[in-house]
Image (cartoon, rainbow, N blue to C red):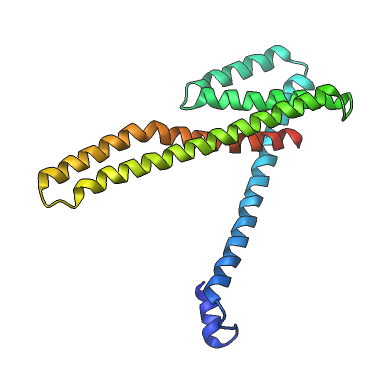
Amino acid sequence: LQKDFERHQAGQESGRDVIGQSIEREMKWGDKKIKRQQFYREVTCAVQLVSRLDRWVMGRNQDGWTTGVLQETAELAQVSFGGRLLRTIGWVYECSADQFIASCWGNFTVDGQLQSWKDGMHSTEVKIKAMSSVAKSGLAVKEMTDAAGSGMSDEDQAKRDAAARQALTSLEGSLPVFLQAIWDISQMDIESTVYKVCDR
């Protein structure tokens, strides 16, 4: 932005909306950078998935692979949102496998169409849940600001303290709503990424 403004002052650039053009350029560059990072993340995950599956597929070590996966899932289940994460990733792996098997029989089979509908319904359900959570979070923020703003303008210190306590109580009550919204949005991203990883 600074360089664009200096070019404008030096007369190298027209004066028409220098700031807007500069911000637009930065946003386009940022979008490219985000897409590149996402692509790198997908390829990295795909390589790791291939290396994990190699033990069973190429090495034919089903027992060793199963033991390793069970140990890893047991560790992951102990962390915050670990169970939800495992269910989400497992769902995508199962759907991707079903899609692959259905595609082996052809593109226009009944099983393929049913799997496609199942995936589409699930995707729509996840998006609706995320939108609902965001809306609930917005309402919770409004309630908190209403609670905080109602007594803060009073000159009486006791009323201001009561309003602050009420705002804090409202925040604590809203934390599960915020966490659910964050998870629902993250779930959309995780599912999208894992589907792309499975396709690579």
Furthest residue toward right: 106
Pinpoint residue 118: horizontal percent, then vertical percent: 71, 26
Q: Quadrant of residue 40?
A: top right
Residue shown at the point (60%, 31%) measured from the top left:
125
Residue shown at the point (73%, 30%) measured from the top left:
50
Furthest residue toward bottom: 11
Furthest residue toward top: 63
Relative height, residue 107 to residue 61 (above, below): below
User: Taking the image as drawn, is residue 62 in sight?
Assistant: yes
Relative height, residue 71 to residue 22 (above, below): above
Relative height, residue 110 to residue 133 (above, below): above
Residue shown at the point (65%, 37%) measured from the top left:
192
| Foreground pick, 14 / 60 | 14
| Foreground pick, 183 / 32 | 183
Q: Quarter of the image for the C terminus: give it.
A: top right
Q: Quadrant of residue 148?
A: top left
Pinpoint residue 49: horizontal percent, then vertical percent: 69, 30
Q: Quadrant of residue 139?
A: top left
User: Taking the image as drawn, is residue 187 in sight?
Assistant: no
Pinpoint residue 23: horizontal percent, then vertical percent: 55, 67
Pinpoint residue 103: horizontal percent, then vertical percent: 84, 27
